[in-house]
Structures are given as structure tokens and as C-alpha cells.
Amino acid sequence: MSDKPKIKVATAWLGGCSGCHMSFLDLDERLIDLVKLVEFTASPITDVKEIPEVDVGIIEGAVCNEDHEHVLRTMRVRCKVLIALGDCAVTGNIPALRNQFVLDEVLARGFLETESTQIGEIPGIYDGDDDVPKLLNRVRPIHEIVKVDAFIPGCPPDADTIWYALTELLAGRAPQWSEGNLRYD
Amino acid sequence: MIAPKTITVRIDGKRCEGALGQTILEIATANQIYIPTLCYLKNLSAWGGCRMCIVETDGSPKAVPACSTPAMDGSTVATNSERLQHLRRMTLELLFSERNHICPICPMNHGDCELQNQGYRHGLDSVRFPYLYPILPVDLTGKYFGLDHNRCILCTRCVRTCDEIEGVHTLDISNRGEKNRVVVDLNTTFGESDTCTLCGACVAACPTGALFDKAAAFRGKLNACRVVRTTCTECPVGCGLLVFTTENRIVEIFGDTESPVNNGHLCVRGRYQTWAEPRNRIQRPMLRRDGKLQPVTWDEALKVIKDATRQVSDWQKALLISPRVTNETVKALKQVGAHCDRVGLFVAKNEVAFCGSLDFAPEAMQRLEDADGIIVLGAQPSRDNGIIAAKIRRAVRKRGAKLLIFHARKSDLDAWADVAANVVSLERSFWKRVTDVLKEVRRPVLVYGPGAMTPIGITVFERLIGVFEKKRSGSAPHLVPLPITTNSAALSKAGVEPLEDIAAWLDVQPLNLLHIIASDEPDGGARMLDERHVRTLLEQIDCVVLQASYESPLMALAKVVLPSAIWCEKSGTVTSFEGRELKIEAVLPPGGEARDDKVILEALSA
């Protein structure tokens, strides 16, 4: 083991399907190479309440609710480099489909009007009801809220794409996107 | 004609020659220099709206669109400077942020979308501008295709195609600025449009997933499909098809841009009707036992027919063929010797006299392209031959050609016609009007269908010829006979007797065996039942063998049913109305146990 201090990485899962994290795990044996260089701190599968100060933050998902916005802003403050991972973080993607509707309609459809609902209730709409974070009027990609240093598009970006982008960034270079490695799906 | 002056342009340091009047894009493309485009489409007028093809040229401080800027002799052009790349990237960012381009849920995803491909090409990993997320409708009312405004980039390729190729101008652009929207007619839907011909050319022209074929959506990516070049057998025009298939199913059909007949354009019959509609196929040979049709093997079915053939005398058996069969099927009939001596062709109404006297009309499509006056007599191109209707609309709307229509049934072409006579008058004033309209016409084309063979049709024909004989200038009309059924002309020339009256033909001798080859007639050959007495006569025949692709009421009268391969499952040739012998390629393996008509005939005479 080298004595070089490891680069600290935190990942967060905002409004997305976690497919990008799954795709990240698809790095398979390359994860072993990766942990030689980096140390994972907070992630969706670690029970860490407060995001620590890290070198690199990786964000999956769009900003859909107040909690997402809070996590994102905190990450921005505590991460030296912030990476948008996947189409939801980069463009809003599927979660942003609800921007075509008024928020009240979306909530009513989801909590009151579904075919299986018998007695429905929209959570978190009363003052002081903080059990669930309130939805924002509009779903937005993360770079519309904070500065983002690198983008890895894809729904999800496949493991090779993630590997390419991470290794480039670890080597201190910006990933060069072209027809060969860029995917929006 | 004087050849246009040759000019020289230096594009990206390469010396390129072109003709005076050519655009920078045309010269660059001819010299293998790639300039990205979105709103440009070959064969359409230049629009210059998307700004992807901008280039720098030494005449102008501004970047200019290569698609609509004529190249200047001796000029220097740069197509890929850093500034241009920056501007193109920004253009793409604006396009992506303007509407809801959500690639993962788009049928054109995976390399079929030109916008997505340009995004990749320009390394667009994010969009700096805030997404507008406009609220936009999706029109799914159309029979074969949908319009999703969320994915529209307003390139107007659909609008220009609809106007310049199909000639109906159903589509246009409404409103201004960010409210710009493609509209159908006067802001209605495809389902309610009364001008849309369902030709689907707009879908073929769309660079994104804004216009998409419903039957093709999410069925496979086109760029990974097998593509087979074949011929449409729905009508005698013989348009070239490109059939996209994957895993032995058709994903989508487009016109073949290399076909001299249709130059890539298709009508609804070739583009959709053959594959985008459910039709019930006859899957396997069937034999009537105890009053019910029951599946049997090919060997059993063929044996029953052979035995029946042997038992009856020659004059008691007959073969009735659809005019959709290939030339090879009839050749096989000649070579192997038919199992029936009497062979008839069940053509369309009034087509017999037509087939008898018919000459092919070589270069008819080119003549229509050049005509300054078109007369349509007893034919219905907008119903039967959409490609010819499109040519006529273009001639009238773009070149100001005169159009005269003599047909009992109304059609959309009547609106463009100078004379549209649904009821033909013999009055002097009417014919004076016809004469006046034709006065200045120099290159007339007379397209006539089987309807011209009726007494009234012949009268009109003779009067028209009279009008031209009296005319002092211009040539005599170029005659274009246009049959209704696909291959009737060639088959009757090959010696199969076209039948005016099927009932009379059946009734000449009481038959014991009748073999009907309906082939892939969409109605399974059932149209013959519309003729008087045919049903009764068929019921009297001991053994009716029905060889067809699709289920029909005829099956109820059949003793033996044989499944016939459809147009995309057999190879051979058909002869178009221009006399072109066009190749049909087998695109798919036969559905169920179906076999090519030719193969079945050979097996029967073996």
C-alpha cells in the first residue's frame, strides 16, 4: 500500500432510481482497484447522518424535494469536486416529466387517485408535518442549483463510462466526451 | 442547355469544384467534407433554420448556413473552426433545453435520432441553459403515426416534405417564438385532418422522435436492423421499398431513395397497409372434414387435390389466379403444365378491355414530372396510386400545370383541378372550357384507368383526342394507361385470360374442381363474391381449392385451403405499368406453413 493519502469520496442519491449506483457497482473487480485509490465515506448504503468533508462528491438523481436541495447544497460546500452522475442529475430526465403538471395534480394523482387507493392522504402538506420532505414545484437538474464540475450522462451511464470518467478525473484530467463514449440513454 | 459554370472553392484547405449556384453544403458533401445538419434534407428546399451547418467564409464576418448559402467562386470556407464548434454546441444546448427531450423514453433512442447523434458528435455532456420544460401535447389520434411536440425541434422537414413531396401541405408552423408549433391543418389533430393522406413521409423526414410510426415504436433500433431492398406490390406503380427487419419481423418500411420510380416517397398502401395493420393469416393447409376445415399436412392437402384433379375431366376443372402473383408463378404454370387447362385472371372491374389493348407506358413517371398539363380519366390515383397523386399535386401546385379530372368519384385532387368533371357533360360550353384550359399546354399527359373503358369513358377519351387534334400548338398527349391491379398487364400479356365476368366464365361448363390462387390479396380474394351469382356458382362446385394468405369468407366455400406466402416472403418479379420488370426479394421466412404460389403449383404438377 502506498502512503499517499486516499482521495475521499461521498455519493448521494437524490431523485433517481438508483440505477446509476447500480451501474457504479457494475465496475465489478475494478472496484478493488478503485478502493486502492479512494476511500468511500458517505453513500446511500452507509448510515452516515452528516456528509463529511470530502474531495469528490458524486450525485445521482434530480432535485425533486427540499431534502434533495439541502443534501445537494451541503455536498457542494463539503466536496472539492462535484460530479453529476446520470441523466437525472444532468438533465432532470424521467423525474422532470412531472414538470408538465401542476404539483397539486401530481400529489393528488399519486396519493388520492390511484386505482388501489381507498382512503388516501397527501403527506407533508400541513405546517409542522415534517415526516417527509416537501416536493419542489419543479424538478431540476443539479447544475441549475449548484456549480457542477463534471458530468457523466447516461441512463444509467454504463460501468465503462463511469470508469473512464473517474479514472480521468483521478488523473487530474477532464473527461473528453465524443461519439464513442457519450450516451443519453 | 449550357452547362453551368464550374467554380472552385477551398473548403478546409481542400480544393473543391462545383457548379455555379450550388450551395456550400452541396459542394462540401460532393467532396466528402462533412458538415453537420439537422433541418437540411436532400430533395427539399433549403430552410437554414437550425444553424447546425454554419460555416465561416471569407466573404462574411458572420457564420453563414452552408445549406442555403451559394458558394462563391474562389472563396475560402472553414467548416470546423473552434468558434463554429462553440456555436454549434450552443445551438444544440438551446435545442435540448427548449423542449422535453428525454432520450430514455423516446422510440428514436439508440442512434436513430439525429439530434441525439449531433449531441454525441459535439461532446455535449450537459446543457448550460435552464430547461424550459414546456407543457406540450402528444397527438396520438393518427391512424399510423403520432406527433409528440415534446421532441420537436421545429426543423420543418415534415412541413416541407408534406408540401413539396406529397403536395398536400397538411402540416405547417403556427405561432411565434417559443410558442412555435407544428400544426395539422388549421390546428386540428391527425385523426381529424381531412387533408392528410397518411403517406407517412413526414415521419420518414423527422430527425427526432417527434413524428413516429406507432407500429414501429420501440420495436427495434433501425440502425441495427437488416435492410432489404424490394418492390411494393400493392399497385402497378412498383415503388422501391426498404424493409427494416429484426428477428424475422418487420420493424418499419420506408421508400427506397434510389428507386427511379418513387425516389424514396411512398403512399399509405406501401408505407403502412401491408404491415402496420392486423390481418389474419392462414397459417397451415386445411381440409374440410365433417363440414369443418381441419389442419392437415401439406402432403395430405396436395394429395387430395391431385386425386381430385385426376378424377375429373379436363373441362371440369379450372384455375383462377389473382393479378398479384409474380411473373415467375405464371412462368411456372407454363413450364410444368398446369393441373387445370382453363386458367383465368380475376382482374378489377373494366380492366379486361384495358388489359387487352394495354401498352406499357415507359418513362411515365418522368413524363408526369415534366408535364404542364395532366388529364386523369377513369382512374383514381389518390385512392389507388398515391405516388402518382403526389406527382400530380406537385405538378399543379409547384409548376402550375393544368389538371383535368374526369371521374365519377370525387377525390382530393378535384380541389386542385381546373376541370373536375364528376358528371361528364356533352355540352358545347363544357368542352369549350376544356379546350381553353388545354390551350397553352405543351407537354400533356393523359393518365387513364379502367374507368376509361366504359361507354362514357370512351366518349370522353374520343372528345379529348378531338380537342388535341384541333389544337395548333403543343404535342399530342402522352398516353399513360394505369391499371388497378398489380400485375394484370404482364400476366395477361403472358397469356392468362383476364375475366370480364367471373360468373359467366364459371358457368360455361359445370365445374367439379376450381383452384383459386388469391395469393396475398388483402381481402383473401373475397372481392369476387361481390359479383353477381359467383357465390351460388362456387357453392355448386364439388372441390374448391383456395390458395390464399389471408382469411376471408371464401374459406367457407373451400374444400381445401392452402396458405400462400405474402409479398415479403417470396422472391420473383412483377412488371410495373411503365413496363419495368421489378424484383421482389424475400424479406422474411414464410409465416406459419405458407409457401410461395410458384412452389405450390410446381408441387401440384409433380
Image: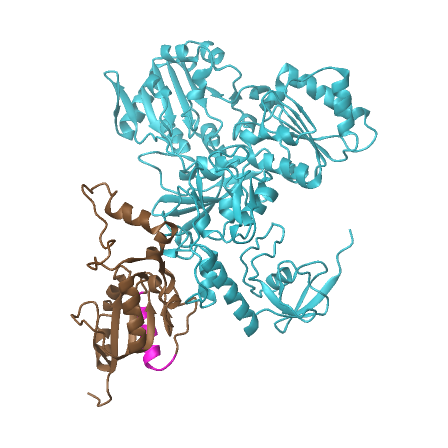
Chain colours: A brown, B cyan
Work out which quarter of the rendered image holds the C terminus of chain B and state it. Answer: top left
Seen in the image, is A132 located left or right of residue B602? left
Point out residue A8 in the picture as x, y percentages from the top left corner: 25, 80
| Snapshot quadrant of residue B534 | top left
Is residue B579 something one can see in this rendering? no
- In front: B447, or B570? B447
Point out residue B477 in the picture as x, y percentages from the top left corner: 72, 30
- In front: B445, or B290? B445
Span of residues in magenta: A158-173
Residue depicted at 73% across the width and 66% down the height: B73
Q: Which residue appears farthest toward the right when viewing the image?
A: B472
Residue B179 magenta = no
Q: Which residue appears farthest toward the bottom when viewing the image?
A: A3
Q: Is residue A9 above or below residue B143?
A: below
Residue A160 magenta = yes
Q: Is residue A156 above or below residue B414?
A: below
